[in-house]
Image: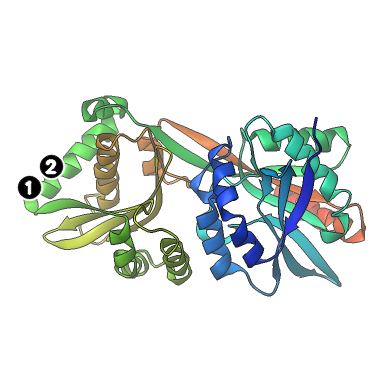
Amino acid sequence: MSEISTGCVSSMDDWLSISSDWTKLLAKSNAATYFLSWEWLFSWAEICMSADRQLHILVFYEKGSLIGIAPFYILKRKFGMFLVREIRFLGTPESGSDFLDVITQKGREKEISNGLYDYLHGEGRSCWDQLNLSDMRSDSLFFLHFKNRLDAEGRYAELSRSAYCPVMKLPSTESDLYVMLSPGWRKKFKQDMRVSNRDHDVSHVVHNGSEVERKLDCFFKMYEEKGGWPGAQLCSILKKLSQKYADHMPFQLDYLYIDGKPKAALFHFKFKGIMSMYLMAVDKQHNPKISLGNLLVGYSVKRAILDGYKYYDFLKGDERYKFHWSNSGHCTLQLNVWQKRPVGYGLALAKMVRQSGKILLR
């Protein structure tokens, strides 16, 4: 077996130089999701990296070929009298990145997890105090092997659930879609369509590629006005993201127009046969008897079926409508590991105290 070498990418220029190899590896990985793409994470870093954050991307090579990437950064923060160095996934906590992981070539997950473990507890031991990895899918092969190694070495690690992400495995036809829905939800969706079309001129308009880029400002104006959520940072990330594509931008923006006015909008990512609903903006004051957001989701799901998508991913969130539409889902996990040094003991103890306090108060 050939030896695997480990390196660290700590500058944006060096990261840019491996963008092509990153994309090729992701295409060959079981962990492939849009939120692990070079374009997404680099755009996130361009907006969200700051003085208290340092790139710490670990790369694993075999005979000159890239076979593993740990997309990390180090967050420096104060904890009492200590300066804590916390390893996190790029893409968190801002922007709601889902399904993060260590990227490995298929079949090499155990080797890369062992290589990462050896680095973190060997050559790279002095670089971190806490490892805080969130939003990993529970069926991640990397996570399985990494947790097994932690257990085998007798190291304390805290495992908790990050989120649940509902998913709809799409049928081949629209008629099959209605069969999949519960009777109550099927009735509600058809009733919302009937009432809205009876009283108003309703249209579902889809924008793709570069059209989405031109509509971003309008979308986020609606996102902030109707939802009350700040959107400036997300808008900046998506604009940076748009600049990294030529003609084939993997975005879709769905609008629901009522009498010619935009009343609901959904921002989607498209990746490997999956349509992922990333952001929603809805005018909830239009008609309280009709769920415009749910109506637009239905139109978008039907369009995804027509376009040949296999899955419609609602991403993280426990909103009721997501569970009515979905027929499967993924659980994501958070893993915390602390170094065996005073600051690590203090961090772990503080976490335990907070958890004990919650138990006592319930």
Task: Give the residue at x 13% y 52%.
Answer: 202
Across and down, in percent, residue 105 comes to 64, 36
Label 2 element class? helix
For disc 1, the neighbor class at 10 Å (few under 14, some 14 to 19, many from 20) is few
Question: Residue furthest toward the right?
Answer: 341
- Nearer the observer, 69 or 346: 69
User: Is residue 362 visible to us here?
Assistant: no
Q: Which residue is mark 1?
A: 198
The x and y percentages for residue 183 are: 27, 28
Where in the figure is residue 10, as x and y percent of width and height? 71, 63
Say what amino acid the circle numbered 2 marks: Arg
Residue 187 percent across, percent down from the top left: 22, 34
**Where residue 194 is drawn, which disc sits there?**
2
Residue in the foreground of this view, choosing between 166 and 274: 274
Of 269 and 280, nearer the camera is: 269
> What residue is at 53 percent from the left and 53 percent from the top?
97
User: Do the residues bearing badges 1 and 2 touch, measured as CB atoms within 8 Å?
Assistant: yes
**Label 2 crowd (10 A; few <14 / some 14-19 / many >=20):** few
Place residue 322 in its image quadrant: top left
Give the vertical position of 15 relative to 27 (above or below).
Answer: below
